[in-house]
Image (cartoon, rainbow, N blue to C red):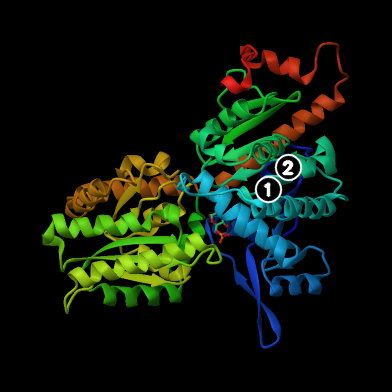
Amino acid sequence: MTVADDPLSDLLQPGETSPLIVIASNRGPFKFHLKNGALQVERGSGGLVTALGALAEQHDVLWVAAALSKTDRAWIEQTGDQPAEVENIRLRLVRSSRKRYEQYYNVIANPLLWFIQHQLWDIPRTPSITLQTWKAWRNGYVAINRLFADVIADSVKDANRPVIIFPQDYHLYLVPRFLRERLGDEVQIQPFVHIPWPGPDAWRILPESIRDEILVSLLASNCIGFQTRRDAFNFVQCCRFYIPDAHSRGSRDSIYYQDRKIEARTYPISIDVEKVEALIEEPETRLLKSQLINAIGDHRLILRVDRIEPSKNILRGLEAFRALLVNHPEHRGRVQIMALLVPSRMEVSEYQDYLQQIMAQAGMINAEFSDQYWEPVRILVGESYPRALAAMQLYDVLLVNPIADGMNLVAKEGALVNQRDGVLLLSEHAGVFYELGEYALVVSPFDIYSTAEALHQALNMPQDERHARAEAMRQQVQSADVRQWFYRQVEDALSALSSQARKSSTPATPGSSTSEAANTEGGVSPDSTPSASA
Ligand code: G6P
């Protein structure tokens, strides 16, 4: 993709130079594997990669990701530590030792940070911060974040155009600080946090120095993107509460720290509408759809599609389905729940245990209720995006009941492709609630009884109401796709860069320091309360 062909060039003002955009994430758009002695490419998985993959194909960006396996490392050997083009995406991988990666990914990022941010710890018992955790922090998380910053800095060092860097998600919280140290104030650093950002109390679990290192590093960014206003607000509160020199001056979405103003903005992520619409027409998806139609027969279908992930609340979902069969026996023999479950983070014991518990619970429900014609629970484990898209066209009810979720793109994909006026049953704690909650049946993820009642209500909902809700949801998803999510961030970055360029070309006048100027912006008086009492 040449700079001139890139649709992003439409966002530039006349005379502005096209920026070098770098996306950095732990999981990259591809995994490499060996087949007959040659390296083959396969698409990566997960919400982040699914959303960003299509964007990176269509724009002039460099994607920096971690090498996750031996074969990923073999690809680096082949490309000689330089960016290389793979299926239209310019990619560079960060190499580390297995041990470091293991400490960073399986000890710190998952489960420690992920569990804090989704509030999954059972705090009377877990987690315990041990010597192993401290070692994993220093030798794993900190070290790998530093490696990422080194690779990014090396990739942009000769750019003679503006540079915008978008580090993605909880794996890379320390990258902004390391980048700032290496590249100075000229570059625009805008991380995006895909997962929920809870309020200050949830972060008590982390030792003070680790917590502060994360927050102070994020404050080296220019702007931090969150899925919802609530996440952005919680971040601001955490900085006020834990970082003595950080002040919000009454704002809910910005923080002043060391004479700089850092924005906490909301960019709800979405799906690539065009791509998903094209994928459901692919022969493979059509074939899978007809196989599923045969398998489902004339049963009503409750569907869920998730990574095997404790925050997705799969166990309580099954429990609610059981309660439906107990409290409303008329559904027995008529309705089936199908769970398409993608294996995830299986090296982490919490995830292994979770899968075992799901299988045991599904087995118990089937043992209790099935007969020769009907098996109430079907669990399909494995990764197949075409199969998920095929099933999403066929559901009567889509169950999305996470304990906490940054966004949940399954709800958006389902709303877009479903052909049966299916009802969305949605947790109030998924980020997507703020966009689709109005048209869904909303439940508390902890309330098994009400979830069962909502399933009953969804299955009995009159056709015209189902249709009206489904149509409204589809329109909502079509009106805000992932390009918008990305373009808004690029636009904000470009305007920050150009106002910074204007500032540095204007001779300084007495009394015009950034902090003083910031004080008068919006007329908000300085926050003089000690941060710890916020
Ligand atoms: C979530 C996270 C992503 C992550 C994905 C899959 O969507 O926000 O950062 O890539 O889960 O998880 P995994 O650990 O397999 O990359």
Q: How many marks do you count on the picture?
A: 2
Nearer the N terminus, badge 2 or badge 1? 1
> Residue 216 shows which numbered tag?
none
Label 1 residue SS: strand
Q: Residue at x 61, y 53 (%)?
A: 109
Disc 1: residue Cβ within 8 A of ligand 1's nearest atom: no
Left or right of residue 115: residue 35: right
Q: Quadrant of the N terminus?
A: bottom right
Label 2, residues with CA under 10 Å away: few <14, some 14-19, many ≥20: many
Q: Which residue is outermost to the bottom?
A: 36
Characterize the local packing of mark 1: few (<14), some (14-19) or many (20 or more) Cα atoms within 10 angstroms: many
Can residue 398 be seen here? The reply is no
List the residue tagged with mark 2: 176
- Residue 284: which quarter of the image? bottom left
Q: Residue at x 36, y 62 (%)?
A: 392
The amino acid type found where label 2 is placed reads Pro
Q: Is mark 2 within 8 Å of ligand 1?
A: no
> Where the C terminus falls, by quadrant?
top right
Determine contact: label 2, label 1, CB under 8 Å: yes
Residue 285: x percent and y percent? 42, 72
Q: Amino acid at mark 1?
A: Pro
Q: Kindly give the residue lying farthest to the left in the view shown.
A: 330
Image quadrant of ligand 1 equals bottom right
Q: Is residue 185 above or below residue 363?
A: above
Spot occupied by residue 6 in the image (x, y as percentages of width and height): 69, 53
> Which residue is the site of mark 1?
167
The residue drawn where x is 65% and y is 26% is 255
Q: Quadrant of residue 69?
A: bottom right
For the residue pair 394 and 357, the one nearer the viewer reads as 357
